[in-house]
Image: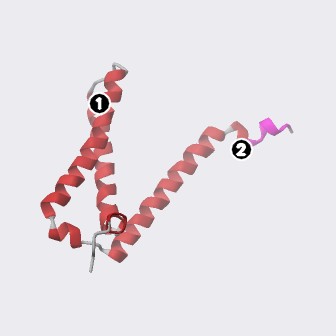
Amino acid sequence: MALKDHWLFSKSNTVIQWSIIIMVLIAVVYLVALSIIVQDLKYPRDHPYLFTLETLLFSLGCGAIVFLMAYGRDDLGLSTVVEFIIISLKFGILSILLQFSGFYSYAFGYKTS
């Protein structure tokens, strides 16, 4: 059997795709667990409007790139709006999980005590 016929090479796209999906799932589960354990809520409680604004800007800004990409490929349509909503939700949830897990307080030096 030649090396190029090995399943790892012949199905490399599937292997890479599932590896990425599994890594993302592990990262999300890890962030959720850290958020439950750490529960860093000091900044959202001290500055609720600023926290809401930065979460919305982060999520909507990342989602807006979909419109630019679709416009550049002449593919604006209903699917673009659906993709925008899904990506915005993903990044909004990521922002909230990063806050609650204590990452932002650590990265930006916000005193939690």
x, y percent for residue 61: 27, 42
Q: Is the magenta stretch mostly helix, strand or loop?
A: helix
Return the residue nearer the eye: 67 or 106. Answer: 106
Residue stretch rendered in magenta on the structure: 2-8
Return the residue nearer the eye: 10 or 75. Answer: 75
Left or right position of 19 against 74: right
x, y percent for residue 105: 31, 68
Left or right position of 41 against 17: left
Q: Which residue lies furthest to the right in this view?
A: 1
- Residue at 27% x, 74% y is 111
- The residue that disc 2 covers is 8
- Residue at 16% x, 70% y is 46
- Please tell me whether residue 71 is drawn above or below residue 50 in the rendered image: above
**N-terminal-most mark, 2 or 1:** 2
**Kind of residue at badge 2:** Leu
- Please tell me whether residue 79 is drawn above or below residue 63 in the rendered image: above
Return the residue nearer the eye: 50 or 108. Answer: 108
Residue 67's tag is: 1
Image quadrant in which you'd find residue 87: top left
Assign a secondary structure to mark 1. Answer: helix
Left or right position of 6 against 61: right
Assign a secondary structure to mark 2. Answer: helix
**Kind of residue at badge 1:** Phe
- Residue at 40% x, 65% y is 31
- As for residue 36 lying within the magenta part, the answer is no
Q: Which residue lies furthest to the left in this view?
A: 49
